[in-house]
Image (spheres, rainbow, N blue to C red):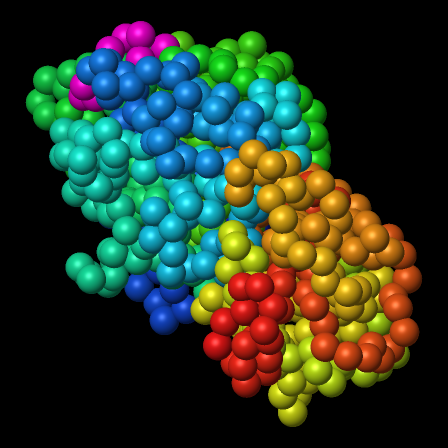
Amino acid sequence: MREDDFKTIVNEAKETFAAPSISAAVLTDGQVYRYAIGQRGLMGGAVDSDTVYQIASASKAFIATCVMMLVDEGRLELDAPVKSYLPEFQLWTKELTEQVTVRDILTHRTGLPRHDVTSFTRPDAVLAETIAYLRWLEPCWGLRERFGYQNHMFALASYLVERITGQAWSAVVRERIFTPLGLRRAHTAWLAYERYDDNYARPLITRGTTAAPIDSVPTDPMACAGSLSMSAMDLLRWGRANLEAHGIGQRESADGTDGADGADGTNGTDCARGQLTVSGEAVRELHCAQMPIRPGELAPYTEPLVNSLDYGLGWFVERYRGVPLVYHGGTLQGFKSVVGFMPEHGMALAVLVNQNDSPVPALVLRQVADAVLGVQPYDWRGFYLDLDTERQATRQREYKAAFAEEARVWPPEAGGVYEHPAYGQMRLTQTPDGPRLAAGWRDYPLRPGAQAPWVIDASDVSQTLPCQFVYEPARAAADPAGDGPNAPATDATASPHANVAPADGPAADAVAPAGDGPDAPATDAAASPHANTSPATAAPPSAEPGVPLAFCAWLEPELKHPIRFERVAGAHGAGEGRPGATG
């Protein structure tokens, strides 16, 4: 593939999807081409190959690699139970807690669905707090039953690395990966890059051809599940290091450069300034298929020419047109990324975009792969354009249909603080503009719903979350299964923190969560994992008497029932006198 071909691919992707900016770099035929186009944000400032973007879930392979370095050193075993290293570790049931292994948490097969809304409701949580509330996250499937993309497990891997090494996970990543590979524009903490200079991309969302700012999602509570940020050149250095560790890529550059002039007028300097200190066996574990991904388990559509799709350790492992392709994408509000490599063809690629829910990284990856393979190109631009057009139309249609046409009376005593042990607190208030829900750093209006009494209106991403109040008499809290506080409730209202609907409440339709493959739709917590999941039954009467016992919201569609938040304080913060009440 020639440099002009690469630039054409990037330019056409930007034009097709009105991306505010793209920064991309590729290694092919021993040459590095880098190209950046567009603006860092609405206030201008051209991007270049050193502009820093959030890479989101492309972070996962970094912590998986650190785990494998500890395996090489004999300090960890992949198939040992996590609890053997973390005695305090607890999941939903005792059986699951005792059986989950290190390999399980790195391959998305623990049985837990996403539960991603915790990133919004608990933005200030430190890593230890994230690990502590894992016991309250309900699974959907059995252990190793199927692939289920899960961010909290990579936070757990980060915490495990901390406990084994006695260092912060961020220090381990910097010392074992950033420094040896020369990643000079890479950061481990959310928004850390803002402290250094102005050359970073701002999160944006586009509607038509118009870009608008969108809030960045706090990533520190999830650690290396999605907290890293870096430039396209640094991300390519990481991709090339994995390619070379695989034993295929170019290992040396005689003159210290890779020959190609960058789009910004500087020489394409060596993108692999060091090598990963990891054994061949560890690399095989990282890059080989560990968990098959069946249709519908990652995204609600399939792609042509993909012969198989699996998950390795922090990497997706695919056969595309019969050729191995290893990659990982990342999605956060306002950002999309992908890094990948083709071991048999010496190609590595990094693509970064500051556009919410953008198909651009997937499109560039597929088109570059076709060019490297020298095959008749598939119409990937048409494929992703049709997919994106249909998804946007469906989102807008479902968003508009979620609201009731008639007014509904806000329950006069509904205001107050409601709490869930994993999702944290939500404060409901009545304002002159109507009821509102505050959770974490965010504040949303509550509006009458068409299929639920109320919906949480996340208008910035055209999404709604159905919700309702619970009024039935309280039951005493119990240790339902008799084997510890991590056991699930066995009755719909037995536990004050049971993630279940009242017996006569509506049931939610499941919506398949999106993955972080290069072609996956949005995975931000306010977007597709909870997209317009609507109860199946009609709304109850307009006004409901008395003080609610709980507030239920459909925050995790795979569970097919809402997350239940117990009322712990009144509208002015006064405790209600029930177990767990505060204030």
Nearest the eye: 575 or 131 = 575
Residue 60 in which image quadrant: top left
Is 484 colored magenta in this rendering? no
Visible in this render: residue 516? no
Check the image and report above or below for 264 versus 428: above
Name the residue rendered at 74%, 85% in the picture: 412
Residue 2 in which image quadrant: top left
In the picture, measured across the screen, residue 331 lies left or right of residue 220, that is right
The mark tally for this picture is 0
**Could you tell me residue 16's position as x and y percent?**
57, 48
Please identify the residue farthest to the left as the structure is shown.
Answer: 255
Is 277 colored magenta in this rendering? yes
Check the image and report above or below for 95 versus 537: above
Report the magenta residues as a range. Answer: 275-284
Residue 26 in which image quadrant: top left
Name the residue rendered at 42%, 59% in the picture: 123
**Could you tell me residue 388's position as x and y percent?**
66, 46
**Could you tell me residue 225's position as x and y percent?**
40, 40
Visible in this render: residue 124? yes
Nearest the eye: 87 or 308 = 87
The quadrant in which the N terminus is found is top left
Nearest the eye: 239 or 144 = 144
Name the residue rendered at 25%, 61% in the picture: 194
